[in-house]
């Protein structure tokens, strides 16, 4: 840019209708250190002369230079407006007014070129696409000039203290973006997948952000950033990540966090993310347990114990019915050999070294019935009930074990001599009793429930969420309660409430989501998660854990000021350049910082930010 051009004076003058006095030839010579030494000024001039013969190209080049000039002037006018106390809206209005003034191609060829490009791109504010096109067309005439034209947008925006880049026309369709991404993924690494991630289920806001980015990059996007944004967007309560969170770039993430004290919109966004994590956990809970109304571990334990007791009562009723059928078939007499039962029980107790621990009252009853040589059905049922009570309530573990051995011998049902014809009915009764005994032994939670050996306030921790609750034991528990929807759902809700507690969220939904402890306990629960919640909710929990980590973790290399004393008001490189180039630099720098901060906040919250960072993904 010529030395006699004073941007501030230009802004303050009424010469805005004129194009900037910009000489591309001088700029090329001053800013192309890599230009071939053999390319003298006369040779460059010859190249320009040859370009002049291609009127459409030169006409389009004038369009580019004029558009860039007005963009820079508009930027200066906006900065000056801010520096003199104007509002951001007023500054934006100045930029827009100036940007609307641009040279229009005069030749039919120039109009055709710019029209074709503008139908796909919007070169009015940041015409990088147009510059790329012109650079390609002029490369044969002069590599130095081509390189200069290609760098013009970035160079001029840098001098103006503004952010360079490309602004696209309104987005196309998600289908077009998906196709472009798939094409780009076919030739480049997109993570483990051979095609790009499916964006068709994304929210309209995220789809538009992806479409805009793919139209800028030709279909290539950062797969890691895209994956994280899709994960956050896939939750029941959709969430938006900041650029730092989406990229997990420690520098960007730290700057965003450190600016939250100065910019309320950032603080509000972080607060909304915390609320979103909590609301998602609540939504997953509601979908996993629509019929569950218990709200704490004690109530959950009551529900599960009651469900088991109902199951046990039904099984016992069937066993009793089978015994009664045997009695009725024997003409009203219960054909059990009381003497054989006494002998079998005594032998089994001695084998287990529990004879001395056997309940004395039960052994006395067995002895009397054996002496009488008779046992009625009522005697048999009462004795089973008494033994079950001892198994539930005796404080002596050996006595409980001895009672179990005697009851097992009763279930073997030794028949009286001459009752062989009743064997099929006896086998049915034996089988039903044995099946119930095995069911209790296979499921510790079932046995604990029907024997009242574990109270409700400890039931959930012992059999669902605690370390003693193994994958196989939880699977057996789920199988036994499969026919009770409310109980099965309660298992999942109890697990989700446990994860909520580990995230440091109270039952009312208050607290700051602690992603580290949430993920730690989610990982510990992962082997048995499939038996606690449906597959959809299990996947949502996994995604929630990832998004919680993205939004709250501070990766290695970050410098987040967690004491909230740093505002993050760091000067931008663009402002430094501006202060050195333009008079009254301190005044303009103040305005530039305001624009830079505003742009930084806007970018941080933009759902598209980070998608275009291809270098970070190795593309």
Image: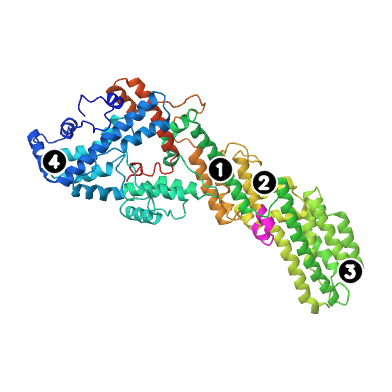
Mark 1 and mark 4: Cα distance apart in space: 56 Å
Which dot marks residue 376?
3
Magenta span main SS: helix
Queried whether the magenta region covers residue 90, the answer comes back as: no
Residue under numbered circle 1: 277
Queried whether the magenta region covers residue 480, the answer comes back as: yes
Residue under numbered circle 2: 461
Q: Secondary structure at mark 3?
A: loop
Task: Give the class, few, some or many, for how many residues have Cα within 10 Å of label 2's Cα (few <14, many ≥20).
Answer: some
**Quadrant in which residue 355 is drawn:** bottom right
Sequence-wise first label, 3 or 1 = 1
Sequence-wise first label, 1 or 4 = 4
**Quadrant in which residue 68 is drawn:** top left
Q: How is the image coloured?
A: rainbow
Q: How many marks?
A: 4
Task: Give the class, few, some or many, for how many residues have Cα within 10 Å of label 1's Cα (few <14, many ≥20).
Answer: many
Mark 4 and mark 2: Cα distance apart in space: 76 Å
**Residue 11 location (% of width, % of height):** 30, 27
**Mark 4 vs mark 2: in front:** 4
Q: Secondary structure at mark 2?
A: helix
Asked if the residue under mark 2 is in contact with the one under mark 1, i.e. CB atoms within 8 Å, the reply is no
Asked if the residue under mark 1 is in contact with the one under mark 3, i.e. CB atoms within 8 Å, the reply is no
């Amino acid at each position: 840019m010529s030395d006699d051009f004073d941007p501030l004076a230009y802004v303050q003058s009424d010469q805005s209708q004129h194009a900037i006095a910009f000489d591309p030839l001088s700029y090329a010579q001053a800013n192309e250190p890599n230009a071939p030494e053999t390319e003298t000024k006369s040779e460059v001039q010859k190249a320009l002369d040859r370009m002049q013969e291609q009127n459409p190209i030169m006409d389009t080049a004038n369009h580019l230079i004029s558009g860039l000039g007005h963009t820079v002037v508009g930027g200066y006018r906006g900065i000056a407006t801010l520096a003199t106390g104007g509002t951001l809206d007023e500054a934006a209005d100045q930029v827009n007014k100036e940007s609307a003034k641009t040279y229009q191609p005069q030749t039919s060829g120039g109009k055709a070129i710019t029209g074709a490009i503008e139908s796909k791109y919007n070169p009015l504010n940041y015409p990088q696409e147009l510059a790329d096109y012109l650079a390609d067309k002029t490369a044969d005439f002069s590599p130095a000039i081509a390189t200069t034209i290609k760098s013009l947008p970035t160079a001029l925006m840098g001098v103006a203290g503004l952010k360079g880049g490309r602004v696209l026309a309104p987005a196309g369709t998600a289908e077009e973006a998906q196709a472009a991404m798939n094409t780009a993924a076919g030739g480049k690494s997109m993570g483990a997948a051979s095609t790009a991630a499916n964006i068709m289920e994304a929210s309209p806001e995220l789809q538009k952000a992806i479409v805009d980015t793919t139209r800028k990059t030709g279909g290539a996007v950062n797969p890691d950033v895209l994956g994280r944004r899709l994960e956050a967007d896939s939750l029941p309560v959709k969430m938006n990540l900041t650029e730092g969170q989406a990229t997990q770039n420690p520098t960007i993430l730290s700057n965003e966090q450190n600016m939250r004290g100065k910019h309320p919109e950032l603080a509000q966004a972080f607060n909304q993310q915390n609320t979103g994590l909590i609301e998602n956990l609540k939504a997953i809970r509601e979908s996993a347990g629509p019929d569950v109304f218990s709200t704490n571990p004690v109530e959950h334990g009551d529900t599960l114990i009651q469900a088991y007791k109902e199951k046990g009562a039904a099984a016992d009723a069937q066993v009793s019915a089978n015994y009664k059928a045997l009695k009725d078939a024997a003409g009203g007499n219960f054909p059990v050999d009381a003497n054989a039962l006494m002998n079998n029980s005594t032998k089994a107790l001695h084998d287990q070294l529990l004879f001395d621990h056997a309940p004395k009252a039960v052994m006395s009853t067995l002895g009397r019935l054996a002496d009488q040589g008779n046992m009625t059905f009522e005697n048999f049922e009462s004795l089973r009930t008494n033994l079950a009570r001892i198994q539930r309530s005796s404080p002596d573990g050996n006595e409980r074990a001895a009672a179990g051995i005697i009851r097992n011998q009763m279930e073997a049902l030794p028949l009286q001599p001459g009752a062989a014809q009743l064997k099929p009915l006896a086998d049915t009764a034996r089988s039903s009793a044995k099946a119930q005994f095995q069911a209790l032994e296979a499921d510790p939670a079932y046995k604990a429930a029907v024997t009242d050996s574990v109270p409700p306030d400890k039931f959930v921790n012992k059999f669902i969420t605690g370390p003693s609750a193994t994958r196989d034991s939880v699977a057996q528990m789920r199988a036994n309660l499969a026919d009770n929807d409310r109980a099965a759902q309660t298992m999942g809700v109890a697990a989700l409430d446990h994860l909520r507690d580990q995230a440091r969220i109270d039952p009312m939904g208050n607290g700051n989501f602690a992603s580290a402890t949430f993920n730690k306990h989610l990982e510990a629960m992962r082997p048995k998660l499939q038996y606690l919640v449906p597959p959809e909710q299990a996947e949502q929990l996994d995604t929630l854990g990832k998004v919680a980590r993205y939004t709250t973790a501070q990766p290695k290399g970050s410098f987040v000021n967690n004491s909230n004393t740093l505002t993050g008001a760091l000067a931008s490189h663009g402002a430094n350049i501006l202060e050195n180039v333009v008079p009254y630099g301190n005044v303009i720098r103040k305005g530039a910082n305001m624009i830079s901060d505003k742009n930084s906040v806007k970018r941080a919250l933009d759902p598209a930010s980070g998608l275009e960072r291809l270098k970070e993904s190795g593309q």
